[in-house]
Amino acid sequence: MKLLLPTLILAAFALTALAIAYYQGDGRHIEGLRRALNLTIMVLPLIFFALMLAGLIQVIIPKEFIANWLGGQSGMKGILLGSLLGALTPGGPSVTLPLAAGFLGAGASIGTMVSFLTAWSIMNITRVPFEAGILGWKFTLIHIASSFFLPPLAGYIAQIMFGDVKLEMFL
């Protein structure tokens, strides 16, 4: 039931877009649905395996390991490790968010996962070649140097402010 509201909001946007395409004519709504089906076929295996991995993380990695390396007791070590893992994790949100949920469900701290997601979103290593190729190495290095401390800082702030918050994980 936790995903009901986000699902309904997304459904409202999708159905509105479908209605707009229908009223534009020329079969645009059919073409849009065909493209949506093609995307679903392409992305569904990725999402399935990401969710599988997220669920399995919670049962195969010992809770003591997660607590020691990524949990609340891990302190800055966990936050720094979360930042490193986030920077090195390839893929989009359909991969990364289930991984974060799996780690949280296995006992990772809020601070560690905030640093993980922050590093993934602002300094992911898999984007460096694209960024350098399009914006140049000078800008890319400035970007990395300027944002290097943000993931650990965000994780540290999150841990101090929200470390005691109990999350309800759906996985």
Image (tube, rainbow, N blue to C red):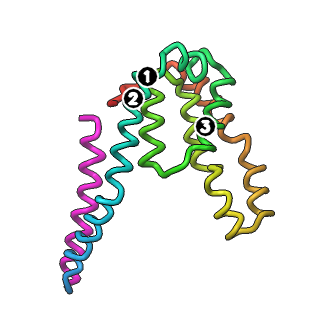
The N terminus appears in which quarter of the rendering? Answer: top left
115 or 171, nearer to the observer: 171
Q: Is residue 135 left or right of residue 17?
A: right
22 versus 148 height, above or below: below
- The three-letter amino acid code for the residue at tag 3 is Leu
Q: Cα distance, mark 2 to mark 1?
A: 6 Å
Confirm whether the magenta stretch covers residue 5.
yes
Task: Identify residue for label 3.
Answer: 85
Element marked by disc 1: helix
39 versus 144 height, above or below: below
Q: Nearer the viewer, mark 2 or mark 3?
A: 2
Q: Cα distance, mark 2 to mark 3?
A: 18 Å
Element marked by disc 3: helix
Residue drawn 24% across and 58% down?
12
- Mark 2 and mark 3 lie on one chain; the one further toward the N terminus is 2
Q: Cα distance, mark 3 to mark 1?
A: 18 Å
Magenta span = 1-25
The C terminus appears in which quarter of the rendering? Answer: top left
Task: Give the x, y percent position of residue 138.
Answer: 80, 63
Q: Is residue 46 left or right of residue 73?
A: left
Tag shown at residue 60: 1
